[in-house]
Image: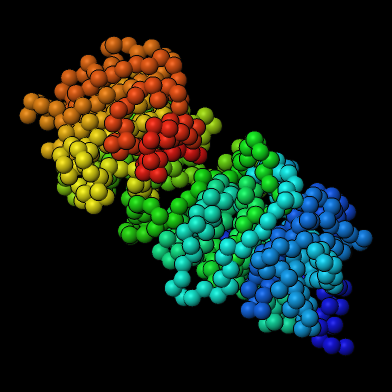
Amino acid sequence: MSLSQALLLKFQHDGYVNGWHKGEHAIQHKMGYAGVMSQAWTWIEPEMPEEHQAFYKTRLPFIPVTTIDDRQRPWSSILAGRDGQPGFVTSQHLDELTLNAHVWEGDPFPQNVALGSRGSPVLIAGIGVDFSTRRRNKFAGYVEALEDDGPVLRVHSVVNEAIGECPKYINIRDLMAFSETNPCVVYRCLNLSPDERLPDDIVSFIHGSDALFFGTYYDAREDGEQFLSHVGMNYRGGRPGFARIRPSDGRTLVIPDYSGNRLLTSLGNIEATPVAGVTFVSFETGAVLYLTGDAHNFVGPVAQQLMPRINALTTIHVTGYIFVEDALPVRQKPGTQVQRSPYSPPIQLLAEEITSTYFVDELQETPMATLTRIEVHSHDIATFTFESPTHVNIVPGQAAILDCKPFVGTLPYQHMAPENPMSVNDDRIRTWTVSRSSRWAGPFPESRNAGTTAGPMSFSLTVRHKPGGAVTSALFAITEQMGKFRPELLEDARPLQFSMPLVGVAGDFTLPTEADACVSGQGGDSSPCAGTRKWLWLAGGIGVTPFLAMFAGLREGHTNDIILVLSTREPDVLLALIASALERKGDHVREHGKHQGTLSIHLFSRFPVTSSSSVATTHGTVLAVEVTHHPGRLNEDTLRTLNIEDVQERQAYVCGSESFERAVLGALKQVGVDTRKVRKEGFVY
């Protein structure tokens, strides 16, 4: 009996799973799951349950599978029927699947399975994802036989591993068959040179994707008889752009690891055999991107240095890729919307993609921020002022990152939480825009230290209560109790000794520096180099917060022409905040007798504005202010009615919810603004 025949018999009778292999043990120890997951390998069954068998046969229009190439690199392929309908899979036994696949040009599957002609078994693993119900199941095994029947490749596979997977990060789609495909290989680069980067359109394709299929390989040659080599296939999902390409080299893919079932089989394979393959698909165009490369897992501080606030991630240094247009015989049904998974956290950018400072990486000890004062503006808006004994450089428009665990505690592991899905990945770290700082000109007692780089400093966060939010709910509950029983603590909260670690400062939603503006070539009168600056600021509700800070960033010696478009349900509250922010630089008016420019506020609100709270009546402000109230809601149509004649000359900044941002960008595009140059800042979570 040959070695390959012996291996096939062992595969058939014993399967793969005889406990966790060394890579799975290693990553479970790193993640702190070794004890609780020590026997979880028994969840993996040696054959498919009947419901899995029926699932593959009746529910799936395509199945992503993993195979390895002649360099032992995993590739994730897409196997589907020619017509894009379910039913291309048959199965007569619980340990057998036959995929009657139409394989298009460019997919690496035919070349990889052809390697089986050399006598070694062809390993295969697949995952079935029903995008209409979020159901998914996995299988693994080997290819027993291949039949090439013209346009159909029959893949007879033996299944000796099967497991059901959780649906947490699957985005629901209404898919339809699309048989009129015309696959075209746009890129085929199987061996990148050391200094080669991925093309810009490939990077954009990755950053626009909300799902990927993740192939791994375990080479068991060093493990003797206990384990056998195998491949794995998995799914990763999130919000569009959750997986990132490092700008520094243009080819390293970074995949964050969200809270899952803690089996860590994919990461375990990588821990032992550091290679992986990833496939992205476009359900709108049918394009398919295949990547393969060298893979590594990072946990803890090392992971957070790459992608702040992510405790575990995988990097794949791409060594080969293929991009095929118009290949997938399944498309998103026109007129339907993707239903995002409620478990997916907001995307986190790479450290090198954002302007940020994380103090845990730079100082021996993380600075602590101590609550000193609370100003209540309404039932759900308040300003919380903190003092830090360490100088922190905050540019107007940036945000403070606070670790709120000392205040609200940590969450135990949760697999699913239907009543509050976002809590599953809640690290208790929150990012809020700084609305004022004692390092800027301001009404703080500490403002005498403004401009220095030593000694204590204060900063304020103007926050809206998020219903159900763990941190803001606690903050506003305490504020309410203080107002009832200890109102003096609102003015001086130091006796509470309520402190939180100031993890860092982040954000590039800031005014350009003098040098930046001159280099960027903002010509004409709007250029800071010319002495006059024209701005268009658009804020949805509490999205006005960064603009409150930007008033402090207005430089001496320039005339500022600002149009602020504000949509709010609380006009009096937000106008009062604007007036307070403007007064902080009012000394310029009192000393020099002139304003630094004009501020035209277009207020869209269905609620009345009282004259006593109007910012236009405030004296000593740094800008001459005019307020125009537009009854009703802000949308594309009402925004266009403003008829801002020089709108294309203005630097536009937008801060608000996703729906607000879409409406604003749509209106700006229609009046000729290049929306690619619009600075955007959203708020989620």
Q: Which of 432 and 183 is in front in this view?
A: 183
Residue 445, image quadrant = top left
Residue under the image location 87 percent in, 64 percent down: 95
Image coords of residue 244 (percent x, y):
50, 56
Q: Nearer the viewer, residue 360 or 398?
A: 398
Residue under the image location 74 percent in, 78 percent down: 115
Residue 588, image quadrant = top left
Where 474 sits versus 140, above or below? above
| Quadrant where the N terminus is found in the figure | bottom right
Where 498 sits versus 90, above or below? above
Image coords of residue 509 (percent x, y):
34, 43
Do we see residue 473 in this rendering? no
Image coords of residue 441 (percent x, y):
18, 36
Where 675 sits versus 100, above or below? above
Q: Is residue 35 left or right of residue 300?
A: right
Q: Nearer the viewer, residue 299 or 515?
A: 515
Q: In this view, does 625 lie to the left or right of 313?
A: left
Do we see residue 7 in this rendering? yes
Residue under the image location 17 percent in, 44 percent down: 529
